Image (spheres, grey):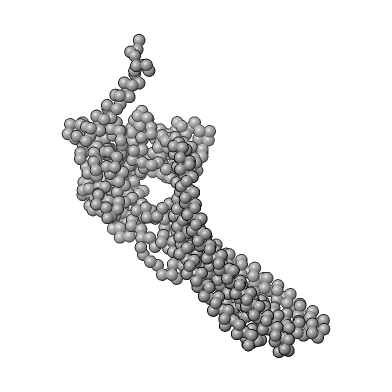
Amino acid sequence: MKKTGFFHRWGKYVRPYWKFFVLGPLCMIVEVLGEIALPSLYANIINNGVEGANIGYIVGICALMVLTSLGMMLGGVGGAFFGARAAVNFAADLRRDVFAKVQRFSFANIDRFSTGSLVTRLTNDVTQLMNFVNMLLRLCLRAPGMLIGALIMVIVREPELARVLLVTIPVLLVVMLLVIRMGLPRFTRMQGRIDALNTDVQENLTNVRVVKSFVREDFEQQKFDHANGELKQAGLSAMRVMVMMMPLMMLIMNLTSVAVVWLGGNQVIAGGMLVGDLSAFITYITQILMSLLMVSMLFMISSRSMASARRISEVLDEEIDLTDEGCALPEKKVEQGRVEFRHVSFRYYKNSEEKVLDDVSLTILPGQTVGIIGSTGSGKSTLVSMIPRLYDVDAGEVLVDGANVKDYSLKHLRDGVGMVLQKNVLFSGTIEENLRWGDEDASDAEIRAAARSAQADEFIERFPEGYESGLDQGGTNVSGGQKQRLCIARALLKKPKILILDDSTSAVDTATEARIRSAFTNELKDSTKIIIAQRISSVRDADQIIVLDEGRITGVGTHDELMRSNREYQEIYESQESGRESVLAEAAAPADGREGD
């Protein structure tokens, strides 16, 4: 994982809004100057106006205090406004970059983070940093400014009495350091528990139909309760530190105030100090302690934001293993559709001994229709995912039109490959919006032609709003077969030179599947078509059929050739035919088992 320097990492989100980052603290300085001035003005009223019964002097000082308060209000409003603008823009740009980085992740990168964790980092963690930036801009000059200003005033007015702070300030600093040291690991743990909870919630909501069909609501509730309980315990552990901090700080502040009143009161009685000066001194002491309390609050928020910043940095620093960097043919496009595998081997986990693909060599000519068949887990989907570089090979090479796929830009390579995945995915929006994923500039006629070829136009037209009908997230308001046909139409609209269908007609009947295959022959006769299927009937008419078994090719040929020479293919055919005959015999037999009339 590549590390990025602190200032380079976060400075890029500050520079575009540097005016807000500067104006916010400067406005807060205006408020601080007013806060430092007011106690002295108040002391002057008591010492000179009240003691001398000088009404004119009191009115003049009060007017000055009102003007000072108005200036403080303007400074406070300005500081809050510019601080909020800076923090929100900072968070928006950071969230954009994190999302853009996730979009560039390969499948292997995504496998390193759970979906729930990525959602938390994009939302909760970025929000924590936004709150920290907002608080930082409002307090970074206000707290130190008030601390320094009030310290100067107490030292100038009563240096002897100011010695009380020599005890108070070190104690407060020790408390703050302890809180930070104890809080950071606890907040890191809490963010991890939020990840786990989000993952559980997402799984439950995404698969709610499966949960209900298996009546697993109680089990899911227990899972949620467990994750929620762990988050609660992690939150309580983190908050205990915060709960202890505030009473300790207030205790120290109140004890300091008592000590000041006691010592200062004795000086007033002895005639060594004026009442107004004691009042001002107490206010300045309170300001000093309040400024330290502000700093402690900032550190308290920073301990959580540091955990969030670390988690966001993990995403931004993640090295993407599939990039265009070093591609030799960045402008090359897929024009013919020839595919060649040369001694390809692959494993999902680099330290795994078992290979998913093992020394696979294969050539697919342009325009051919190729079927791939094999048992579950034989590596069929993995094999075709190498063509658009969803994964990279561990050994060997994959060539498209005679060039290694690593020499293409990912955009041009994937523009030339259309895939209908085993797990069909539709997005919330209208049917037309989903189809336009294949070609956003397609005309209405082209959209309808693609739907007809995929045998989807008939059921689309039955919807009240036709192509403008809305789809729920994931396409849950259409059947499995309808979803497959919409995904096929989307891929056809792309007009790819290589079309990959990964068991994409398993939910449609054989007659509809035959019409779809016929449309492929007519509409994409110049395109290379690779069909992964469980049913031999789906690939029987292919130009060549590849038989995979445990990551190795055990046979290549037409249906007739494989029936004569390949034992694995024969076994698949016999099992499917015997299963079909059993179903037909069962359907023909009378319900009571007796012969029909």
- The percent position of residue 129, horizontal first and vertical second, equals 51, 63
* Residue sitting at x 30%, y 60%: 326
* Residue sitting at x 43%, y 70%: 6
- The percent position of residue 204, horizontal first and vertical second, equals 46, 45
Number of numbered discs visible in the structure rendering? 0
Foreground of the two, 160 or 68: 160
Q: Is residue 81 left or right of residue 402?
A: right
* Residue sitting at x 66%, y 78%: 258
Q: Is residue 269 visible?
A: yes
Foreground of the two, 516 or 261: 261
Q: Is residue 123 visible?
A: no
Q: Is residue 227 left or right of residue 492?
A: right
- The percent position of residue 13, horizontal first and vertical second, equals 49, 66
Quadrant of the drawing holding the N terminus? bottom left
- The percent position of residue 493, horizontal first and vertical second, equals 40, 41
* Residue sitting at x 34%, y 47%: 416
Residue placed furthest toward the left: 565
Quadrant of the drawing holding the C terminus? top left
